[in-house]
Image: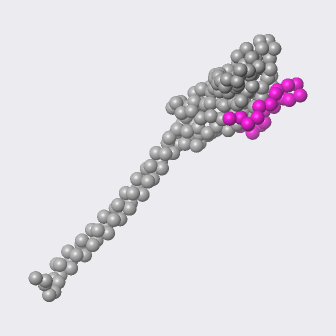
Amino acid sequence: MVPDTFSGSDIATAIAAWLALILSIFSIVISWKTQRLAQRQEERRKPILVPYFFDGYVRFNTDPFSRIYAFLVSVSNPSDSDNAVAEVDLQLTYTTQTGIQMKVKMRADPALESSFGDGSRSLQIPARVDAHQTVSGWTYFRVEEALLKGAVIDGYSVVLNDSHGNLVALEPIMVREYGDDIKAKPRKDDFQK
């Protein structure tokens, strides 16, 4: 049986139910937006380093027979968390005279900066990179000529390992030979703190 008329309490109950529904939908929207904001904040806290390549040189030494590579890099930290460059390695890919492709990895050695003798500042490892900051400097690597023995260099990759174990790599496009006519002069803006 359907009532002919609605009482005042029936109307009040229906209005209360509709208001409760509207409030619950509003609460769901607000909680969804709050969750998205929290997720974005969490994403910004994830450690990440962004490297940039500026310049690269190789110098051939006769005593001992070796190649010394120098790469000017900067490392930015776009996240909201502090980070650090824990290690820097050079990964050299080459093809031997017998046609076998090989890879070798060398650790950066800041003591090699004297090989270039121009007062360039090396990137001191470990290098602290605060949130939203950038550090820069030269990284130096020695490769013994006996290791290469007439091999053809296929590629270079400078690999940075941060304090959280994340790896990022740079692949220098061009590495120039360093000589008396070419000096790797540091640019003022490369070393601003």
Residue 11's image quarter?
bottom left
The residue most toward the left is: 1
Of 147 and 70, the residue lying toward us: 147
Residue 112 visible, this angle = no
Horizontal side of residue 190 vs 43, given as left or right? right
**Residue located at (55% from left, 39% from top):** 48
> In what quadrant of the picture does the C terminus appear?
top right
Give the x, y percent position of residue 90: 66, 26
Residue 44 visible, this angle = yes
On screen, 26 above or below 148?
A: below
What residue range appears in magenta?
A: 171-192
The residue most toward the bottom is: 4
> In what quadrant of the picture does the N terminus appear?
bottom left
Q: Is residue 113 magenta?
A: no
**Residue located at (62% from left, 30% from top):** 159
Give the x, y percent position of residue 54: 73, 37
Horizontal side of residue 160 vs 119, given as left or right? left
**Residue located at (60% from left, 26% from top):** 87
Q: Main secondary structure of the magenta part?
A: loop
On screen, 28 above or below 76?
A: below
Horizontal side of residue 57 vs 36, given as left or right? right
Give the x, y percent position of residue 41: 47, 48
The residue most toward the right is: 181
